[in-house]
Amino acid sequence: MEIKIAPSILSADFSEMGAAVKKLEKSGADMIHCDVMDGSFVAPITFGAQMVKNVRPLTKLPLDVHLMIEHPKSQIKFFADAGADIITVHYGACAKISQTYLRETLEEIKSLGVKCGAVVNPDVPVENIFPVFGLCNMVLLMSVFPGYGGQKYIAEVTPKIAKAREYARSIGKPDMDVEVDGGVTEANCAEIIKAGANVLVAGSTVFNSLDTSVTIRRLRGI
Ligand code: DX5
Ligand code: ZN
């Protein structure tokens, strides 16, 4: 399977976001991971659809929008109109509203012609999103608790990656994107890929790198 690296712009200097995005594309990134935080679902606030709209014309890379927000369904159209290629929403934010809210939100994303994905935090069983695997283009397994870059990878997540890949195979979606987000480094990327992930988010590892192209290549396990 193709391994895709999605650097997170959370770790960029927001006053130089355009240059950061162009540099990531030049350095061989496969997607741009946009961490949207609302100060409620997670403590920090980062940016909204306007940032996605502004970076859209600067790169041909897919914009991978990770919504760490409450009531995600109410925001989908803004991010779709801003140019998001894939939007992922948290199981935890949806489950607190209703049993059907996650499915409704994923269907809303797809209805706007955008790819969709469900996200589970490290302490949420991946089985909780098995019912929507068929609807998702990608599933995102958080390997840190959301809110901050630069945290340490939670090793207990590794078996969840294998479970997600196994379940995708069992429903006839062997090549479904399984994304891992948080604490991904050159030291642990091989273990994460071996477990079954094929999309790796990396924020601090990439932005702290002395040579972004080399780091992105190493994160692919090559
Ligand atoms: C955390 C974000 C992650 C984070 C990754 O809430 O969802 O995407 O920015 O940053 P690193 O790779 O530094 O853990
Ligand atoms: Zn993220």
Image: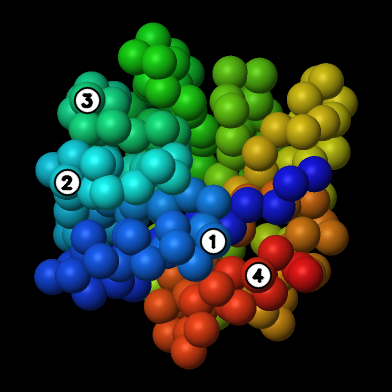
Please report the residue visible at 42 percent of the width from the left and 53 percent of the height from the top.
33
Q: Is residue 1 visible?
A: yes
Residue carrying label 3: 81
Type of the residue with mark 1: Gly
Mark 1–mark 2 Cα distance, whole angstroms, equals 21 Å
Q: Using residue 84 as the reference point, say whether residue 124 is left or right of it.
A: right
Is disc 1 surrounded by few (<14), some (14 to 19) or many (20+) residues within 10 Å? Answer: some
* Marks 4, 3: nearer the viewer: 4
Tell me if residue 166 comes above or below residue 3 in the rendering: above
Sequence-wise first label, 4 or 3? 3
Residue carrying label 1: 28
Sequence-wise first label, 4 or 1? 1
Q: Looking at the picture, how far across and down is residue 20, in whole percent? A: 30, 67
Tell me if residue 106 comes above or below residue 179 in the rendering: above
Type of the residue with mark 4: Arg
The residue lying toward the viewer, choosing from 58 and 81, is: 58
